[in-house]
Amino acid sequence: MISEIVFISLWYVTFAYLIICLYKLSTRKSQTQSLEITSSPTKTFYFYIVSFIGLLMTSSGLLALLTFIVNRSLSNQLVDLDFGPVALGISSIVVGYPLWFFHWKSINKQISEYPTEYSSIFRTFYLYFTAVLSISFAIYFLIEAFLFIFGVGNNEQELKDAINSIIRGLFSLGIWIFHWKLIQKEEHLVSSESYYLFRDIYLFSITITSLIILSNSASSVLISIFSSGYDSLFNNNLIIGSSLQSIWWDFRTGIIGLVAGSLLWIFHWLLNIKKSPRRSTEAIVVYTITLISGFVAIFAIGGIINDILNFIIPSDTQSDSTISSLFNNYPSAITILIISLSLFFYHRNHIRQKDNFDQINKSNQIFTYSFTFLGVLLLFPGITILFHSVVMSGFDNVSITNNSTLVTGITFILVGAFTWYYNWRHAQSRTENGLDLGSSSRRAYFLTIFGIGVVLFAISALTILFFSILHILELKFGVETIKSTRIFISIIVGIAVIVPFHYQVYKNEKKFYKTTSSPKPSIKKNVTILCQIQDSEFLQQLQSDLGYSINAVEWSDEGIENISTKYLSVSKITDAINNTKGSHVIVILEENGAKVFSHSGKTIKKF
């Protein structure tokens, strides 16, 4: 199971990386090239494509020969060996290696003459795409080999297949090491934005893949532990067949995946991403992982609550509800909850460590209103399902289906109400402190609820009106009408519970929105700020708040590495710049803040 997940994840990441990078190549803006660069983009593209093809041919040829050697060494039938792979391997090496060597040597010669070629978008794409492809092959084949070594691989796999997997994995790993060393060597020579984009795509693609491997492997280990405890506690085999053997099988599989995923994650995340300056790509990925893991945790809690309610209100009256049946699905639910909460708290803590004051405030807004909205999304169907279940029981006989619907509605209401109330209370406390009142996140939250509510109300009202008129004309208006429209009546009831409350709050704050929606335009000034290269995210926010570009110069004095923009408020610095009297402004960062000076821009001729 773990090998299939690794295969799908890695190939999905490789394909996604290829599509994103090709899109970037096709939409890249034309930039003024240095006059020293004599090679045309078409020629450069040709050399890298042919080099890549030559590398593939050489690699496949060597692997074919090594596979043949292993098969011959371990096979008892020396006469019936197929020599086709030998011929194919030798042919691939004879053709592929000179092809790769000549073109790769020409590329290096071009770079030695024109160092600006280090920033070539084609070279960046080639290096990182080869890296993501080779590391994908390496991880997949090595995991396949270790699964066989630990006795949890494919039953049809033989020793020679495991050895071949090790050879393929190590060979792919060697290709990755070669290109990764080139990347590390040239990193300080490259300053183009495209390079950092490809770098981010590669690092985060592999990081996400490693998290998928880690999550799946950790779930195998935890489910094995919880299932073993379940069997011991209730003297019941949760897993079909030999419980102990199956649990031990999943445990070993999970350990192999944990080791592989941890190595990938530690190298690409801890050693490369976490120590680098924060970039917008990192923010998008980390926020997405945090939100998804939080949502999954809430749904896992909902699954646990649903099992408890099914035990209290059984949907099948003929079956005996026992304590063991109550905990039947708990190993999986608790495992999902532990993994999702671990991902959520780790990545949220990472955001708070790297973000500055304003970014932390914005991240709190995003998380607060995202989970508040999730609470509404769970609460609304809960109210609708519960009301529909009650209405249905009034016209139909209470049945097993109605009990199941009732449990589902109560589950949605409990989980949704708790999620909404907890986050809404936090949002209101922030509003009372003046942090979120009038913010775009809060307004988007309200307007989204209003938009969805109006659309659902219009559709439901139209349907109810249609059936009412139809039944009046057919002279059968009454109970049959309610039966035909009870779903849409339930939807309107859910809207009536949620939308008016939010509209009342929004109406009370509407005056403030009007005063803050059109701020006084700031006067454009010549702003110069002394900063470091890793402060690019802070500078982008400052420019966005000011509404015009600023001049950022690199600070070269000693001791500036202790100065960080993490705890600086961009809004306060923006206000300080706008309130200065001079047309020229100088911003100097300090350890606990920033100083803003202004001058007229006029030089003193006589002094």
Image (cartoon, helix red, strand yellow):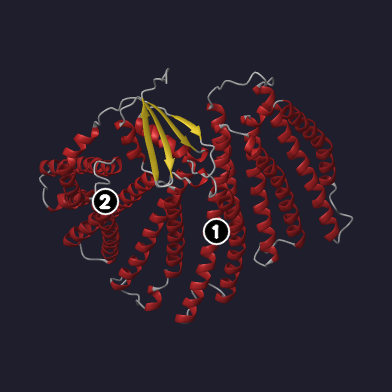
* Residue with the most extreme front position: 607
Disc marking residue 250: none
State the residue at coordinates (74%, 49%): 171
Displayed quadrant of residue 117: top right
Q: How many marks?
A: 2
Viewer-nearest of discs 1 and 2 = 2
The amino acid at mark 1 is: Leu
Residue indicated by mark 2: 430
Q: Where in the figure is residue 58, as x and y percent of width and height?
A: 78, 40
State the residue at coordinates (15%, 49%): 481
- Nearer to me, 602 or 295: 602
Q: Quadrant of the C terminus?
A: top left
Above/below status of 252 relative to 360: below
98 to the left or right of 6: right
Tag 1's secondary structure? Answer: helix
Q: Where in the figure is residue 124, as x and y percent of width and height?
A: 63, 35
Residue indicated by mark 1: 214
Above/below status of 497 relative to 157: above
Q: Where in the figure is residue 338, as x and y percent of width and height?
A: 44, 64
Above/below status of 55 relative to 404: above
The amino acid at mark 2 is: Arg
Q: Is residue 233 visible?
A: yes
Near mark 1 (Cα within 10 A), the count class, few <14, some 14-19 or many ≥20, is many
48 to the left or right of 454: right
- Nearer to me, 595 or 489: 595
Tag 2's secondary structure? Answer: helix
- Nearer to me, 309 or 6: 6
- Nearer to me, 89 or 437: 437
* Residue with the most extreme right position: 79
State the residue at coordinates (58%, 35%): 195
Q: Is residue 239 visible?
A: no
